[in-house]
Image (spheres, helix red, strand yellow):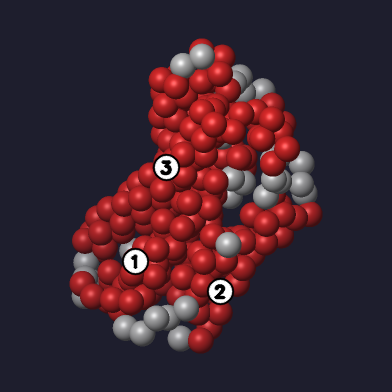
Amino acid sequence: MLDGFVLLSVGLKLGGADWTLAGLWLAVVASGLYHGVNPGMGWPLAVSAGLMERSSRALVLALWPLTVGHLLAMLVVILPFALLVSLVEWQRQIRIGASLLVMGFGIFRIVNRRHPRVLARIRPAQLGVWSFAIAIAHGAGLMLVPIYLGLCRIADVDGGHDAAGVLINTNLGMAILVSVVHSVAMITTGGISAWLVYRYLGLRFLSRSWVNLDTTWAISLILVGALSLASEMIE
């Protein structure tokens, strides 16, 4: 499963900084694929747009606001950590706190399965707003935080930067890059899923094959946080 691959990529040290770096970037991409294949992230809305307009162009156009909304949701969550990790003396505490936060949100999602009411008030035409809100509500950005912090740790060690200003610029750049790579992977997978349903499989397939990934998503958050926490405790 893609979510299992994400967890293994985050948690395992593959031997050396280069292999660890490759594993973390693979985790960024894999988490995007995992989010993209999940119908809850919005690709069925692109199918709906295509069917209502009877145009594949409408489907493709609908993917853009979904992408922008998801990307903004990633940035809103990750950017504060980009500023925090510049506090070198608090690196360990920040990473432990982030791990606990991710685990806590996963547990919350298991206990409270109801979706926020604000999501029901967003009109279907507001795809960008909907994509942003749903990604925040599901903790999609939180899943990236431990991966992002691992990449920052490698960058800090390799670069040997001491100045807070340099660290902030480096970490902000990394936050944007992680968010973009993840969002591209997400919308690529979602777009392919939407196109297959629209062009070949039809709505009957979608109604029969809908899978609710809320529980799997919540468990993934808990495991990502737990592996990240274990990694900090071992070092």
Q: Residue at x 25, y 55 (%)?
A: 169
Question: Residue at label 2?
Answer: 227
Q: Secondary structure at mark 3?
A: helix
Q: Secondary structure at mark 1?
A: helix
Q: Nearer the viewer, mark 2 or mark 3?
A: 3
**11 lies above or below 193:** below
Residue 101 seen in the current view: no
Question: Residue at label 3?
Answer: 188
Question: Percent position (x, y) of residue 177?
Answer: 31, 51
Q: Which comes before the other along the chain, label 2 or label 3?
A: 3
Looking at the rendering, in which quadrant would you find the N terminus? Answer: bottom right
Q: Amino acid at mark 1?
A: Cys
Measured in 3D between alpha carbons, the distance from the residue under mark 2 to the one under mark 1, in whole angstroms, is 17 Å
Q: Residue furthest front?
A: 200
Choose between 210 and 185: the one closer to the eye. 210
Question: Percent position (x, y) of residue 97?
Answer: 54, 67
Q: Residue at x 66, y 35 (%)?
A: 205
Q: Amino acid at mark 3?
A: Thr
Marks 2 & 3, CB-CB < 8 Å contact: no
Q: Secondary structure at mark 2?
A: helix
Q: Amino acid at mark 2?
A: Leu
Question: Residue at label 1?
Answer: 152
Choose between 98 and 130: the one closer to the eye. 130
The crowding category of the residue bearing disc 3, from other C-alpha atoms within 10 Å (few below 14, some 14 to 19, many at least 20), is some
Q: Residue at x 36, y 54 (%)?
A: 178
Question: Percent position (x, y) of residue 171?
Answer: 31, 58
